[in-house]
Image (cartoon, helix red, strand yellow):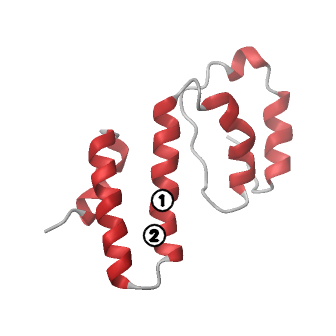
Amino acid sequence: MLKGTQAQQIITVQERIPLRQRNKVREVTLDMAANMAKAVRRWEVFLFPRYPLLQKAYQLALRLSSIFTICKSKTKAFKRLAQWYNDVEASAIESFNTVARYTEPL
């Protein structure tokens, strides 16, 4: 676990971890603050080809976040949320089940 939110500080710490240990990564959990995106982009070249499901989950999380930050109209937001819900169902990623339950169409 790394403390702090400075992307460069996190990247520096990650680079000190031997490659053999980095290859054992099974799960990455990040605070999805905007400044963490830089650290993620740095490692997506390494992680996403190995773990395509992680890439899909990351993309779904970003899309969900963007719905709440970008959409100004409720109608547009609900439409995007419905599309997001359908994509979550298709992905079969169980981590999104709780959120998806609250967004499922009536």
Q: In which quarter of the image is residue 94?
A: top left
49 or 13: which is nearer to us? 49
Which residue does the image show at 57% across and 23% down from the upper left?
50
Q: Which residue lies furthest to the left in this view?
A: 106
Identify the residue under disc 1: 63
For residue 67, the mark is 2
Report how many numbered discs are placed on residues in the image.
2
Q: What element carries label 2?
A: helix
Q: Quadrant of the C terminus?
A: bottom left
Q: Is mark 1 on a helix, strand or loop?
A: helix
Whether residue 99 is visible here, answered yes or no, is no
The answer to whether residue 14 is above or below residue 7 is above
- The kind of residue on which mark 1 rests is Arg
Asked whether the beta carbons under mark 1 and mark 2 sit within 8 Å of each other, the answer is yes
Could you give the CA–CA distance between mark 1 and mark 2, rounded to whole angstroms?
6 Å
Which residue does the image show at 32% across and 81% down from the upper left?
75
* Residue 90 screen position, x and y as percent: 28, 43
Which residue does the image show at 44% across and 61% down from the upper left?
64
Say few, some or many: other residues with alpha carbon within 10 Å of mark 2 (under 14 / 14 to 19 / 20 or more): some
Q: In which quarter of the image is the N terminus?
A: top right
Question: Viewed as shown, does residue 86 lie left or right of 68?
Answer: left
61 or 14: which is nearer to us? 61
44 or 98: which is nearer to us? 44
Question: Viewed as shown, does residue 105 lie left or right of 95?
Answer: left
- The kind of residue on which mark 2 rests is Ile
The answer to whether residue 41 is above or below residue 80 is above
* Residue 101 screen position, x and y as percent: 23, 58
Whether residue 45 is visible here, answered yes or no, is yes
Which residue does the image show at 78% across and 34% down from the upper left?
14
* Residue 51 screen position, x and y as percent: 53, 27
